[in-house]
Amino acid sequence: MKEKIISEINLDLVFQCNDFSQFSNKLKDTKTHLIFESIFWEKVFLSWINTILKKEDYELPNYIFEKKSFSLGLQIISNQEIASLNKKWMQKNGPTDVLSFPIISDESLNNLDHIELGDIFISLEMALEQSYEYKHSIYREMIWLASHGFLHLLGWEHNNEHDLENMLNFQEYLITRLD
């Protein structure tokens, strides 16, 4: 992969998190508490944006690589809330782990310096269930789900097994860049 030099990138993150005090006994370690902090997610998304912008061989819209300022929303919500969004916007019943609503899909935006990517919604309850199922931490699961939602905001789709495998591999790559 070719790497290029980029100037400073700005990120405007709108972060909201429900009160999940009912899960406090399951969220005891210090690292887990990071997932409830806006500054943590700002650093994560900035890292991922910088990683993506330094490389020129990703299958993403070209106008993304020209930007210096990005904004997006992240909300950590309940199963009930995500089920409602899933029904209203995706016509699917029941909760899911992550939903993304990209705003950009038009290359006419390529003349703007700032780009609004869209919104990501993550169900903490689903993330907790999946962290137990896959035998890893809630911190790891939340990072995984956020990376998946983030790639969807950038236009990544997985309409077949090959595309899904590529997306999952790229998610893993982004996550390793955080360490």
Image (cartoon, rainbow, N blue to C red):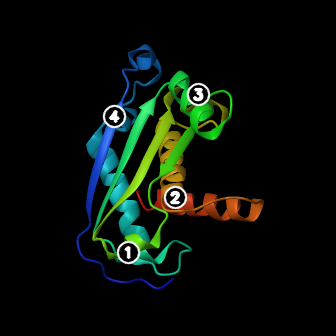
Q: Quadrant of residue 5?
A: bottom left
Residue under label 3, please give it: 83
Q: CA distance from mark 1 to mark 3?
A: 34 Å
Residue toward you, 25 or 51: 51
Of the two numbered discs 4 and 3 in the rendering, the one whose residue sits closer to the viewer: 3
Q: Upstream in the sequence, badge 2 or badge 4?
A: 4
Q: CA distance from mark 2 to mark 4?
A: 20 Å
Residue extending farthest to the top is 22
Residue under label 4, please give it: 16
User: In the shown orientation, is residue 93 left or right of residue 21?
Assistant: right
**What number is the disc on residue 36?**
none
Q: Are marks 2 and 4 in contact (CB under 8 Å)?
A: no
Where is the C terminus found, in terms of image quarters? Answer: bottom left
Q: Upstream in the sequence, badge 2 or badge 3?
A: 3
Q: CA distance from mark 1 to mark 2?
A: 19 Å
**What number is the disc on residue 110?**
1
Residue extending farthest to the right is 161
Instruction: Identify the residue shown where x is 68% and y is 29%.
Output: 93
Q: CA distance from mark 1 to mark 4?
A: 29 Å
Instruction: Give neighbour class at mark 3: few <14, some 14-19, many 20+ (Cα, 10 Å).
Output: some
Task: State the SS at label 2.
Answer: helix
Residue 176 in the image: state x and y as whole percent.
48, 59
Of the two numbered discs 1 and 4 in the rendering, the one whose residue sits closer to the viewer: 1
Of the two numbered discs 1 and 2 in the rendering, the one whose residue sits closer to the viewer: 1
Q: Quadrant of residue 70?
A: bottom left
Q: Upstream in the sequence, badge 4 or badge 3?
A: 4
Residue extending farthest to the front is 108
**What number is the disc on residue 151?**
2
User: In the shown orientation, is residue 94 left or right of residue 161?
Assistant: left
User: In the shown orientation, is residue 155 left or right of residue 108?
Assistant: right
